[in-house]
Image (cartoon, helix red, strand yellow):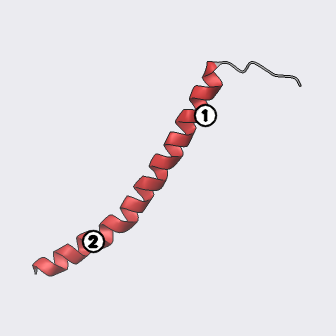
Amino acid sequence: MITLYLGPGLGAGAIITVIGIIVLVLITLFTFLWFPIKRYLKKRKK
């Protein structure tokens, strides 16, 4: 079995990529939920 030393930079880059994807998904969900809720609250105030 051959093992390669890829260095700490690859691990850090992978972790940052995963965190970035998770944040992107959360922001997308928040955006899709926030605007309809905001519209509903505006209608309810009137």
Q: Is residue 46 left or right of residue 20?
A: left
Q: Residue at x 25, y 74 (%)?
A: 39
The residue that mark 2 highlights is 37
Q: Secondary structure at mark 1?
A: helix
Res 14 label: 1
Q: Residue at x 47, y 50 (%)?
A: 24
> Which residue type carries mark 2?
Ile
Q: Are marks 2 and 1 in contact (CB under 8 Å)?
A: no
**x and y, in percent, of residue 7 in the image:** 67, 18
How many numbered marks appear?
2
Q: Residue at x 56, y 38 (%)?
A: 17
The image shows residue 39, relative to residue 18, as above or below, that is below
Q: Secondary structure at mark 2?
A: helix
Figure quadrant of residue 9: top right
Res 1 label: none
Question: Which of the marked residues, 2 or 1, is nearer the chain's N terminus?
Answer: 1
